[in-house]
Image (tube, rainbow, N blue to C red):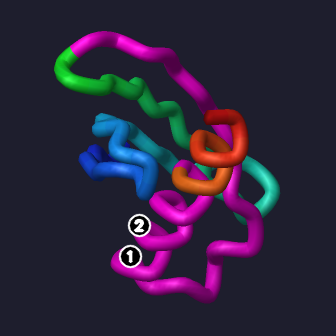
């Protein structure tokens, strides 16, 4: 399991974890905060990762987190 932290383009901070899952994928879960206040949690999955390096998998997870959260807020 790997940890990551980031900030979405609309200003929410998140902490997340991701791990290898079935079907050539990684599953992730992220908790979001704005100004230190809990704002929600989301989870998702990124597929076709077997040919990606570890840094590229991390970027793919971060991109998926951004897309999931920003489209809702």
Q: Which residues are magenta?
A: 37-65
Q: Quadrant of the C terminus?
A: top right
In the image, residue 64 lies in the stretch drawn in magenta: yes
The local crowd at label 2, few if under 14, some if 14 to 19, many if 20 or more residues have their Cα within 10 Å, is some
Examine the rendered structure and indicate whether residue 4 appears above or below residue 55.
above
Give how far across and how far down residue 53 sits, in percent.
Answer: 44, 85
Q: Residues within 10 Å of mark 1 (few under 14, many from 20)?
A: few
Check disc 2 and report its element: helix, strand or loop.
Answer: helix
Q: Choose top left, top right, bottom left or bottom right for residue 3.
A: top left
Residue at the disc numbered 1? 54
Q: Residue at image x 20%, y 23%?
A: 35
Query: Which residue is farthest left?
Result: 36
- Can you tell which mark lies on residue 26? none
Question: Does residue 47 sit above or below 32 in this rendering?
Answer: below
Q: Which mark's residue is nearer the viewer, 1 or 2? A: 2
Tell me the quadrant of the picture where the N terminus can be found. Answer: top left
Label 1, label 2: how far apart the Cα atoms are: 6 Å
The disc placed on residue 58 is 2
Against 56, is 16 above or below? above
| Label 1 close to label 2 by CB (< 8 Å) | yes
Question: Is residue 49 found inside the magenta-colored segment of the image?
Answer: yes
Residue 22 % position (x, y): 74, 49
User: Residue, x 59% and y 27% (percent of image)?
Assistant: 42
């Amino acid at each position: 399991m790997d940890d990551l932290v980031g900030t979405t383009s609309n200003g929410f901070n998140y902490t997340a974890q991701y791990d290898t899952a079935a079907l050539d994928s990684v599953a992730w879960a992220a908790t979001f905060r704005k100004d230190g206040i809990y704002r929600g949690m989301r989870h998702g999955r990124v597929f076709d990762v077997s040919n990606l390096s570890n840094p590229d998998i991390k970027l793919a997870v971060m991109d998926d987190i951004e897309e999931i959260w920003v489209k809702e807020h």
